[in-house]
Image (spheres, rainbow, N blue to C red):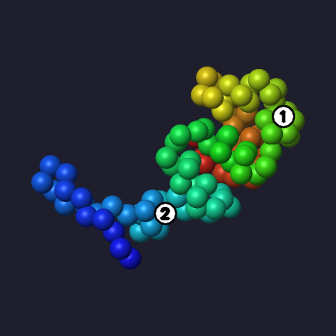
């Protein structure tokens, strides 16, 4: 295991890959997430909404997911873009359709 040593404000820090950090700390061990580590890492980084990341990983379009959830595509788009948080029922329906824990999406 080769890691970089950084000094920030005179203190040494070790730079480790995110997946190794998660393994060391036990973070991201959602037992029912059934998602590969790179997808969990993308969710953790937060560049896109978890719904969008997982939907794309599952090979679904917004229309596919909206249909499975009984939601409108525009409403799903608003959730994915962060314009709306989504109701509890909507998040549960999305989690069920994506086969993940609701906690992964929020």
Element at badge 2? helix
User: In this view of the protein, which residue sits in the foreground, 34 or 16?
Assistant: 16
Question: Which residue sits at x=49%, y=63%?
Answer: 19
Residue 34: percent from left, percent from top: 68, 61
Residue under label 2, please give it. 19
- Left or right of 68 in this view: 57: left
Q: Which residue is mark 1?
A: 63
Around disc 1, counting alpha carbons within 10 Å, would you say few (fewer than 14), some (14 to 19), or many (20 or more)? some
Is there any visible trace of residue 25 in the rendered image? no
Report, in whole angstroms, how far the alpha carbon at label 1 lies from the one at label 2.
32 Å
Q: Residue 104 got which mark?
A: none
Q: Position of residue 7 (x, y in %)?
A: 19, 56
Residue 73 picture quarter = top right
Q: Residue at x 56, y 50 (%)?
A: 42
Q: How many marks?
A: 2
Q: Position of residue 40 (x, y in %)?
A: 57, 55
Query: Mark 1 and 2 residues: CB-CB less than 8 Å, in contact?
Result: no
Q: At x 65% / y 45%, what residue is drawn? A: 53
Q: Is residue 95 left or right of residue 14?
A: right
Counting residues from the N terminus, which is met first, the one under dot 1 or under dot 2?
A: 2
Q: Position of residue 90 (x, y in %)?
A: 73, 33
Q: Is residue 24 above or below residue 83?
A: below
Q: Quadrant of the N terminus?
A: bottom left
Which residue sits at x=69%, y=37%? 91
């Amino acid at each position: 295991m080769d890691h970089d040593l950084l000094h920030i404000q005179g203190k040494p820090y070790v730079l480790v890959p995110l997946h190794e950090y998660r393994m060391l700390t036990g973070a991201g061990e959602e037992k029912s997430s059934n998602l590969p580590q790179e997808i969990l890492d993308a969710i953790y980084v937060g560049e896109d909404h978890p719904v969008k990341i997982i939907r794309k990983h599952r090979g679904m379009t917004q229309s596919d997911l909206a249909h499975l959830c009984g939601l409108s595509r525009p409403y799903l788009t608003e959730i994915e873009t962060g314009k709306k948080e989504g109701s509890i029922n909507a998040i549960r329906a999305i989690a069920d359709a994506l086969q993940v824990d609701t906690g992964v999406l929020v």
